[in-house]
Protein backbone atom coordinates (compact mmCIF):
# COMPACT_ATOMS: atom_id res chain seq x y z
CA UNK A 1 0.00 0.00 0.00
CA UNK A 2 1.36 3.40 -0.96
CA UNK A 3 1.84 5.84 1.90
CA UNK A 4 1.27 9.34 0.57
CA UNK A 5 3.09 12.40 1.85
CA UNK A 6 1.46 14.80 4.26
CA UNK A 7 2.38 18.41 5.09
CA UNK A 8 5.36 18.56 7.41
CA UNK A 9 6.23 14.89 6.98
CA UNK A 10 9.93 14.62 6.18
CA UNK A 11 10.61 10.89 5.84
CA UNK A 12 8.35 8.41 4.07
CA UNK A 13 8.62 4.70 3.47
CA UNK A 14 6.55 3.35 0.60
CA UNK A 15 5.57 -0.22 1.29
CA UNK A 16 5.46 -2.65 -1.60
CA UNK A 17 2.44 -1.96 -3.75
CA UNK A 18 1.90 0.50 -6.57
CA UNK A 19 5.51 1.57 -6.96
CA UNK A 20 6.96 -1.82 -6.12
CA UNK A 21 5.19 -3.37 -9.09
CA UNK A 22 6.43 -0.76 -11.56
CA UNK A 23 8.52 -1.91 -14.46
CA UNK A 24 9.67 1.38 -16.00
CA UNK A 25 10.07 4.66 -14.16
CA UNK A 26 11.04 8.02 -15.65
CA UNK A 27 13.28 9.84 -13.17
CA UNK A 28 13.39 13.64 -13.31
CA UNK A 29 15.34 16.06 -11.14
CA UNK A 30 16.13 19.75 -10.94
CA UNK A 31 13.48 20.99 -13.35
CA UNK A 32 14.04 24.51 -12.04
CA UNK A 33 10.92 26.02 -13.58
CA UNK A 34 12.17 25.32 -17.11
CA UNK A 35 8.81 24.32 -18.56
CA UNK A 36 10.09 24.08 -22.14
CA UNK A 37 12.71 21.53 -21.09
CA UNK A 38 10.23 19.54 -19.00
CA UNK A 39 7.69 19.37 -21.80
CA UNK A 40 10.42 18.34 -24.24
CA UNK A 41 11.54 15.49 -21.99
CA UNK A 42 7.98 14.23 -21.61
CA UNK A 43 7.39 14.45 -25.36
CA UNK A 44 10.67 12.73 -26.26
CA UNK A 45 9.92 9.81 -23.93
CA UNK A 46 6.19 9.57 -24.71
CA UNK A 47 6.73 6.43 -26.80
CA UNK A 48 7.80 4.58 -23.65
CA UNK A 49 5.03 3.14 -21.51
CA UNK A 50 6.06 4.32 -18.05
CA UNK A 51 4.46 2.87 -14.97
CA UNK A 52 5.48 5.88 -12.91
CA UNK A 53 7.44 9.14 -12.93
CA UNK A 54 9.63 10.25 -10.04
CA UNK A 55 10.54 13.84 -9.22
CA UNK A 56 13.75 14.29 -7.21
CA UNK A 57 13.22 17.89 -6.18
CA UNK A 58 13.88 21.49 -7.19
CA UNK A 59 10.81 21.80 -9.35
CA UNK A 60 11.22 25.57 -9.04
CA UNK A 61 14.06 28.07 -8.77
CA UNK A 62 16.07 29.94 -11.42
CA UNK A 63 13.61 29.36 -14.27
CA UNK A 64 10.78 31.48 -15.71
CA UNK A 65 7.74 29.18 -15.32
CA UNK A 66 7.46 28.07 -11.66
CA UNK A 67 3.66 27.87 -11.50
CA UNK A 68 3.31 25.96 -14.74
CA UNK A 69 6.10 23.57 -13.79
CA UNK A 70 4.49 22.74 -10.45
CA UNK A 71 1.14 22.32 -12.20
CA UNK A 72 2.60 19.90 -14.73
CA UNK A 73 4.36 17.83 -12.07
CA UNK A 74 1.12 17.65 -10.11
CA UNK A 75 -0.74 16.59 -13.25
CA UNK A 76 1.78 13.80 -13.81
CA UNK A 77 1.02 12.74 -10.21
CA UNK A 78 4.31 10.99 -9.43
CA UNK A 79 4.18 8.44 -6.62
CA UNK A 80 7.62 9.69 -5.61
CA UNK A 81 8.05 13.45 -5.36
CA UNK A 82 10.51 14.96 -2.91
CA UNK A 83 11.55 18.46 -2.00
CA UNK A 84 14.77 20.22 -3.03
CA UNK A 85 16.63 23.18 -1.58
CA UNK A 86 15.11 25.68 -4.03
CA UNK A 87 11.66 24.33 -3.26
CA UNK A 88 12.51 24.80 0.41
CA UNK A 89 13.60 28.37 -0.30
CA UNK A 90 10.34 29.09 -2.12
CA UNK A 91 8.28 28.11 0.91
CA UNK A 92 10.49 29.98 3.39
CA UNK A 93 12.24 27.01 4.99
CA UNK A 94 15.73 28.02 3.89
CA UNK A 95 17.81 31.01 4.88
CA UNK A 96 18.48 32.78 1.60
CA UNK A 97 21.80 34.04 2.94
CA UNK A 98 23.09 30.62 1.89
CA UNK A 99 22.38 31.56 -1.76
CA UNK A 100 24.52 33.71 -4.03
CA UNK A 101 22.97 37.07 -5.03
CA UNK A 102 21.62 35.78 -8.35
CA UNK A 103 20.04 32.69 -6.79
CA UNK A 104 18.65 34.83 -3.97
CA UNK A 105 16.98 37.22 -6.44
CA UNK A 106 15.52 34.31 -8.42
CA UNK A 107 14.23 32.72 -5.23
CA UNK A 108 12.43 35.88 -4.09
CA UNK A 109 10.97 36.24 -7.58
CA UNK A 110 9.80 32.61 -7.56
CA UNK A 111 8.07 32.95 -4.20
CA UNK A 112 6.19 36.03 -5.41
CA UNK A 113 5.03 34.18 -8.52
CA UNK A 114 3.76 31.02 -6.83
CA UNK A 115 0.13 30.72 -5.81
CA UNK A 116 -1.14 29.33 -2.51
CA UNK A 117 -1.88 25.94 -4.08
CA UNK A 118 1.64 25.72 -5.50
CA UNK A 119 3.18 26.57 -2.13
CA UNK A 120 0.96 23.99 -0.43
CA UNK A 121 2.07 21.31 -2.87
CA UNK A 122 5.75 22.06 -2.25
CA UNK A 123 5.10 22.17 1.48
CA UNK A 124 3.60 18.66 1.31
CA UNK A 125 6.73 17.07 -0.15
CA UNK A 126 9.00 14.91 2.06
CA UNK A 127 12.78 15.15 1.90
CA UNK A 128 13.35 11.39 1.64
CA UNK A 129 11.41 8.41 0.37
CA UNK A 130 12.32 4.74 0.69
CA UNK A 131 10.80 1.96 -1.39
CA UNK A 132 11.83 -1.67 -1.61
CA UNK A 133 15.62 -1.62 -2.11
CA UNK A 134 16.10 2.01 -3.09
CA UNK A 135 16.28 5.38 -1.35
CA UNK A 136 15.31 8.66 -3.04
CA UNK A 137 16.64 12.05 -1.89
CA UNK A 138 17.45 15.38 -3.50
CA UNK A 139 20.87 16.09 -2.04
CA UNK A 140 22.42 13.16 -0.17
CA UNK A 141 21.40 10.44 2.28
CA UNK A 142 23.25 12.33 5.03
CA UNK A 143 21.71 15.72 4.23
CA UNK A 144 18.69 15.05 1.97
CA UNK A 145 18.06 18.62 0.87
CA UNK A 146 21.39 20.37 0.70
CA UNK A 147 24.60 18.27 0.39
CA UNK A 148 26.22 17.81 -3.03
CA UNK A 149 27.52 14.33 -3.90
CA UNK A 150 30.10 14.88 -6.60
CA UNK A 151 33.22 12.93 -5.62
CA UNK A 152 34.26 9.57 -4.20
CA UNK A 153 35.02 10.90 -0.72
CA UNK A 154 31.58 12.42 -0.20
CA UNK A 155 29.90 9.39 -1.77
CA UNK A 156 31.78 6.99 0.51
CA UNK A 157 30.60 8.87 3.60
CA UNK A 158 27.02 8.81 2.35
CA UNK A 159 26.93 5.09 1.66
CA UNK A 160 26.91 4.80 5.45
CA UNK A 161 23.75 6.88 5.78
CA UNK A 162 21.27 4.62 4.02
CA UNK A 163 20.48 0.91 4.17
CA UNK A 164 19.11 0.16 0.72
CA UNK A 165 21.22 -1.00 -2.22
CA UNK A 166 20.34 1.86 -4.61
CA UNK A 167 20.12 5.57 -3.85
CA UNK A 168 18.84 8.11 -6.38
CA UNK A 169 20.06 11.67 -5.86
CA UNK A 170 19.90 15.04 -7.66
CA UNK A 171 21.10 18.53 -6.73
CA UNK A 172 24.46 18.63 -8.59
CA UNK A 173 22.79 18.94 -12.03
CA UNK A 174 25.30 16.37 -13.31
CA UNK A 175 24.46 12.89 -14.53
CA UNK A 176 26.65 10.42 -12.67
CA UNK A 177 26.82 7.11 -10.89
CA UNK A 178 29.21 5.56 -8.38
CA UNK A 179 29.33 2.19 -6.64
CA UNK A 180 30.32 1.70 -3.03
CA UNK A 181 33.29 -0.39 -4.14
CA UNK A 182 34.49 2.40 -6.43
CA UNK A 183 34.11 4.97 -3.66
CA UNK A 184 36.16 2.77 -1.32
CA UNK A 185 38.91 2.66 -3.95
CA UNK A 186 38.67 6.45 -4.43
CA UNK A 187 37.52 6.01 -8.03
CA UNK A 188 35.55 9.12 -8.95
CA UNK A 189 31.90 9.00 -10.11
CA UNK A 190 31.36 8.14 -13.75
CA UNK A 191 29.51 10.48 -16.10
CA UNK A 192 27.48 8.41 -18.56
CA UNK A 193 26.99 8.88 -22.29
CA UNK A 194 23.56 9.54 -23.76
CA UNK A 195 21.59 6.26 -23.88
CA UNK A 196 24.16 4.47 -21.72
CA UNK A 197 22.61 1.58 -19.81
CA UNK A 198 24.03 0.39 -16.49
CA UNK A 199 23.25 -2.76 -14.54
CA UNK A 200 22.02 -2.01 -11.00
CA UNK A 201 21.16 -5.56 -9.99
CA UNK A 202 24.02 -6.28 -7.61
CA UNK A 203 26.33 -3.55 -6.28
CA UNK A 204 25.35 -0.74 -3.92
CA UNK A 205 25.21 2.36 -6.06
CA UNK A 206 24.26 6.05 -6.12
CA UNK A 207 22.72 7.43 -9.28
CA UNK A 208 22.05 11.01 -10.38
CA UNK A 209 19.74 11.39 -13.42
CA UNK A 210 21.03 14.90 -14.09
CA UNK A 211 19.02 18.09 -14.43
CA UNK A 212 16.02 18.62 -16.66
CA UNK A 213 16.10 22.39 -16.53
CA UNK A 214 19.68 23.49 -15.87
CA UNK A 215 22.41 20.94 -16.70
CA UNK A 216 25.89 21.77 -15.40
CA UNK A 217 28.08 19.13 -17.04
CA UNK A 218 28.88 21.03 -20.22
CA UNK A 219 25.98 19.48 -22.14
CA UNK A 220 23.02 21.89 -22.40
CA UNK A 221 20.54 19.14 -23.25
CA UNK A 222 18.00 18.18 -20.59
CA UNK A 223 18.99 15.16 -18.53
CA UNK A 224 16.85 12.35 -17.16
CA UNK A 225 17.02 8.60 -16.53
CA UNK A 226 14.83 5.55 -16.97
CA UNK A 227 14.79 2.91 -14.23
CA UNK A 228 13.63 -0.54 -15.29
CA UNK A 229 12.82 -2.37 -12.06
CA UNK A 230 12.26 -5.65 -13.87
CA UNK A 231 15.55 -5.74 -15.80
CA UNK A 232 17.26 -3.77 -12.99
CA UNK A 233 18.88 -1.31 -15.36
CA UNK A 234 19.12 2.47 -15.51
CA UNK A 235 19.30 4.23 -18.88
CA UNK A 236 20.61 7.80 -19.00
CA UNK A 237 19.07 10.14 -21.55
CA UNK A 238 19.89 13.61 -22.92
CA UNK A 239 17.16 15.47 -24.77
CA UNK A 240 17.43 18.66 -26.82
CA UNK A 241 14.95 21.47 -26.23
CA UNK A 242 14.41 25.03 -27.41
CA UNK A 243 16.86 26.80 -25.11
CA UNK A 244 16.26 30.15 -26.79
CA UNK A 245 12.58 29.96 -25.93
CA UNK A 246 13.36 29.52 -22.24
CA UNK A 247 15.94 32.30 -22.41
CA UNK A 248 13.39 34.66 -23.95
CA UNK A 249 10.91 33.80 -21.20
CA UNK A 250 13.57 34.60 -18.62
CA UNK A 251 14.32 37.92 -20.29
CA UNK A 252 10.62 38.78 -20.42
CA UNK A 253 10.31 38.05 -16.69
CA UNK A 254 13.33 40.18 -15.80
CA UNK A 255 15.43 37.30 -14.48
CA UNK A 256 19.22 37.80 -14.43
CA UNK A 257 20.95 37.47 -17.80
CA UNK A 258 23.58 35.19 -16.27
CA UNK A 259 20.94 32.56 -15.53
CA UNK A 260 19.78 32.61 -19.13
CA UNK A 261 23.27 32.53 -20.59
CA UNK A 262 24.37 29.46 -18.66
CA UNK A 263 21.62 27.39 -20.26
CA UNK A 264 23.38 27.62 -23.61
CA UNK A 265 26.61 26.25 -22.16
CA UNK A 266 25.28 23.67 -19.76
CA UNK A 267 27.13 25.14 -16.78
Image (spheres, rainbow, N blue to C red):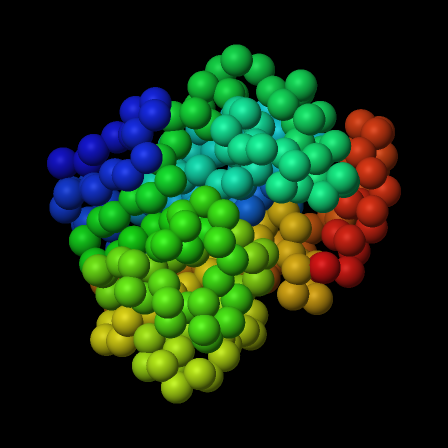
Q: Position of residue 218 (x, y in %)?
A: 70, 66
Residue at the image point whose x is 66% and y is 31% from the top: 107
Q: Position of residue 93 (x, y in %)?
A: 50, 29
Q: Is residue 24 left or right of residue 241?
A: left
- Which corner quadrant holds the C terminus? bottom right
Residue at the image point whose x is 25% and y is 72% from the top: 201
Q: Position of residue 127 (x, y in %)?
A: 38, 40
Q: Position of residue 59 (x, y in %)?
A: 54, 37
- Which corner quadrant holds the N terminus? top left
- Up the image or down, 123 lies above or below 136; here it is above
Q: Is residue 169 left or right of residue 94?
A: left
Residue at the image point whose x is 63% and y is 23% from the top: 111
Number of numbered discs on residues: 0
Residue 14 in view in this figure: yes
| Towards the viewer: 13 or 27 | 13
- Up the image or down, 250 lies above or below 25; here it is above
Q: Is residue 26 left or right of residue 264?
A: left
- Up the image or down, 14 lies above or below 158; here it is above
Q: Is residue 232 left or right of residue 44?
A: left
| Towards the viewer: 50 or 28 | 28
Instruction: State which quadrant residue 178 falls in.
Output: bottom left
Residue at the image point whose x is 56% and y is 70% from the top: 194
Amino acid sequence: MLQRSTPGKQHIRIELGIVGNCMKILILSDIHANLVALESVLKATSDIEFDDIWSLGDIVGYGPRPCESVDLVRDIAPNVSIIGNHDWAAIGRLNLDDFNPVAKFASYWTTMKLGVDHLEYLESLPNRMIEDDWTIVHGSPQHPVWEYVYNARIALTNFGFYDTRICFIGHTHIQLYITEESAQDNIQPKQPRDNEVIDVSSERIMINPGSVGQPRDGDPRAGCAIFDTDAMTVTFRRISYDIKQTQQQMKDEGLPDSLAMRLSMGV
